[in-house]
Image (cartoon, grey):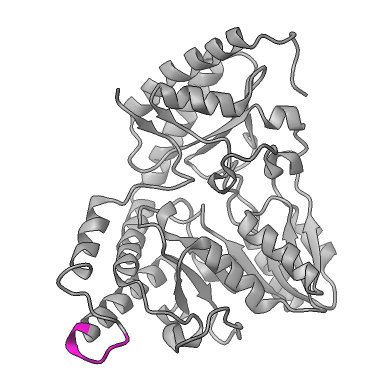
Amino acid sequence: MKRIYMDANATTPVLPEVLEAMRPWFLESFGNASSIHQPGQRARAAVEQARAHVAKLLGCRPAEVVFTSGGTESDNAALFGMVHAGEHLITTAIEHHAVLHVAEKLRERGAEVTFLPVSREGVVSPEDVRRALQPNTKLISVMYANNETGAIQPAVEIGKIAREAGVRFHTDAVQAAGKLPLNVEALGVDLLSISGHKMHAPQGVGILYVRKGLQLEPMMFGGSHERQRRAGTENVPGIVGLGKAAEMALENLNSGGVARLARLRDRLERGILAAVGGAGVHSGGVARTANTSNMYFDFLEGEALVIALDLRGLATSGGSACMSGATDPSHVLLAMGVTPRHARASIRFSLSKLSTDEDVDAALEIVPAAVARLRELAPVNAGTLG
């Protein structure tokens, strides 16, 4: 049975070119990038070359790129490094838990936190951000693209509001990397998080962009690595892989790769909606990342559908991979006003640059059959799950 992977928002495969770029740094060139001998110097040069590739993707200075272990650490470092007791943080109800849980912890430590609502399409209002500003507001943290629905947030407008108010702005761009332009000047951000494994680099490496001159209190101590912003021996193979993935992501953005993904995603949605009654798309009326579709299927449980699709060779997700196995409905969908019952009837399809027309063709055979079978096994009264 051929397997089809449509869970790229959870993780992506390492591309062959990325793996090949990493290979020497596991074997022949394994030096510590902080060592002054030749193996160490070669490792340092590789790290700095990767930093330059990431900086080009972001339109920033290489010195503003801090390598981390991934998006969760980058988000944690941004919020814990900026907000302290007595200061105010503005964020939204649809953030990844790497932001939401930090915000809750900051509140326990004496910070003020405002969790802004979103529209029924899953988008925060810039005016709500403006109205939430206080004299002690230190940081605004709003994701660029939602990991569950793909809904793109008004980052540029929020960046302007933050600049006018003299407030720092962080965006979690984990799901935007490789799918949307990430020029930090155009976005107006002071801090930006990326995770390598969402863009065909290995798991366990990411970056935090830190604007020049910004004083960020480090979370980790023990060395002067990353210009004293993140102690710890650099993960040279992972960093090299992220650099290569960033280089390839920029090429893909400039060569129409995103438009191809959007075409595949739209064909998948149209085909499912034509074949399956009682189905729809969350955030379908707003701009989304080109690869993401969060769909609901009335009269069934999303978790059961994910399992049924997997048994037929199609990998999808019930939402955030970090909440896999959770019994609660998606906090993102609930924040959008979706009922708990309807939220539980939803699953996420997320494509990657490796997705093909043949994958979509297969999914259009598998999904309607799986939905029909589940509905036969668990009949419910006619109506909607409103």
Image height check: is 314 above or below 105?
Answer: above
Locate residue 359: give its quadrant: top left
Image height check: is 386 above or below 45?
Answer: above
Q: Measuring 58% from the left and 51% from the top, which residue is drawn there?
A: 145
Q: Measuring 58% from the left and 73% from the top, which residue is drawn there?
A: 77
Q: Considering depth in this image, is 289 or 342 the residue closer to the camera?
A: 342
Report if residue 375 lies within the magenta region. no
Q: Quadrant of the C terminus?
A: top right
Q: Measuring 35% from the left and 71% from the top, which residue is drawn there?
A: 235
User: What x and y, as percent, mark residue 224?
Assistant: 45, 89
Q: From the viewer's perspective, tell me whether residue 237 is left or right of residue 364.
A: left
Q: From the viewer's perspective, tell me whether residue 151 is left or right of residue 117.
A: left
Q: Measuring 65% from the left and 35% from the top, which residue is drawn there?
A: 285
Highlighted magenta segment, given as a residue range: 34-39
Q: From the viewer's perspective, tell me whether residue 348 is left or right of residue 39.
A: right
Locate residue 280: give its quadrant: top right
**Magenta segment, prevailing SS (helix, strand or loop):** loop
User: What x and y, as percent, mark residue 325?
Assistant: 58, 39
User: What x and y, as percent, mark residue 11?
Assistant: 43, 48
Image height check: is 302 above or below 245?
Answer: above
Residue 254 shows in this picture: yes
User: What x and y, as percent, mark residue 164?
Assistant: 73, 74
Q: Considering depth in this image, is 56 or 386 the residue closer to the camera?
A: 386
Q: Quadrant of the N terminus?
A: top left
